Image (tube, rainbow, N blue to C red):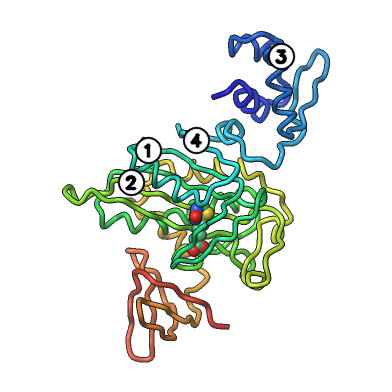
Amino acid sequence: MALKDDILSELTANGFVSGEYIAEKYFVSRNGVWKAVKKLRDEGYDIEAVTNKGYRLVSELNKISEGAIRSGLNSDWSFVILDEAVSTNNYAKELAVSGKKENTAVIAETQSGGRGRLGRVFYSPKGDGLYMSLLVRPTMPVADATFITSYTAVAVAKAIEKLCGHEVNIKWVNDIYMNGKKVCGILTEAGFDFEGGTLDYAVIGIGINVLGGEFPDELKTIATSIEKESGEKVSRNALAAEIMNNLSNIAEGITSKEYLKIYRQKSNVIGKRVHVTYGNETFDAEAVDIDDNAGLVVKTKDELRTLNSGEVSIKL
Ligand code: BTN
């Protein structure tokens, strides 16, 4: 990690930090510290210097920063931070296939080809959102890999609520909603070891509308942002760290199935009339439950059916 990222971690975690302390801790000269602070200022961070006290981060700028994320993490991750990616999922999948180790986060300020489920585009304007793909390699059978998406939905929901203090819901399978509109989508892609019947890697793509709240016409009625709904300018760095912390033990978390309680509690479809798209079929039904396999149980006029994939929209 570059000295400026170390300094950013110190400032994010500690309030005032003296140049002398940083110089001693990281074996650099005071002039080296000053130059690194200048680089951070050039990047846009507002850092004040007060005689006899040291440096202090006045405002964490609206910029994704490895140092700021690291300061909130309680486990070990590698990072690729990009100004722009076509899709962070594409990037992370390439890393996975080339053998990159687990727990690598790819985060971009904007995406030119952000992808959603079912071939949709994910709108990814610069600076407003968190566009993050986590390359993980939990040890689990292929059959359990399908739980990663619902597990992530709970991890993201908890993180958003903690940082903005506003309740969120989960629309089966994996969309996070605030006040009836979508703030986050999740796209999980995986590679398998066919011989062993186990998961080789999963790339968990998470797109969250954090700041701002202006959307193109076609999204205006369905999308929103955390800031728009809660009034809070949540730090994208703090949010990334919180989500990564919540995802630090995926295999154990999925095995215990405890998370499914929250997944059910936060569901905004149970008890609602829904329009179902399931493979080539479309039909109306009532959503009645989420089962222990995270499948949505729906009641049509003739029968109870359990959906393990597909999509539902809530009928008003
Ligand atoms: C959906 O809403 O259907 C899923 C959206 C997933 C978007 C995220 S943004 C980061 C990662 N990169 C992508 O191209 N997609 C995911």
Note whether residue 168 is visible.
Answer: yes
> On the rendered image, what quadrant is the N terminus found in?
top right
Label 2 and label 4: CA atoms lie apart by: 17 Å
Label 3 and label 4: CA atoms lie apart by: 26 Å
Inspect the image, locate mark 1, and give the three-letter code of the amino acid beneath it. Glu
Label 1 and label 3: CA atoms lie apart by: 35 Å
The mark found on residue 253 in the picture is: none
Note whether residue 206 is visible.
Answer: no
Q: Which residue is mark 2?
A: 201
Question: Which residue lies at the image location 38% right of the left edge and 87% below the top edge?
Answer: 300
Pick the front one: 294 or 10: 10
Q: Are marks 1 and 2 in contact (CB under 8 Å)?
A: yes
Q: Earlier in the sequence, mark 1 or mark 3?
A: 3
Question: Which residue lies at the image location 52% right of the left edge and 47% below the top edge?
Answer: 132
The mark found on residue 19 in the picture is: 3
Inspect the image, locate mark 2, and give the three-letter code of the amino acid beneath it. Tyr
Asked if the residue at label 2 sits under 8 Å from ligand 1, the reply is no
Q: Earlier in the sequence, mark 4 or mark 1?
A: 4
Question: Count the marks: how many?
Answer: 4
The 10 Å Cα crowd at callout 4, few under 14, some 14 to 19, many 20 or more, is some
Inspect the image, locate mark 4, and give the three-letter code of the amino acid beneath it. Phe
User: Where does residue 314 sit, x and y in percent of width and height?
Assistant: 53, 78
Q: Nearer the viewer, mark 3 or mark 2?
A: 2
Q: Which residue is mark 4?
A: 79
Label 4 and label 1: CA atoms lie apart by: 11 Å
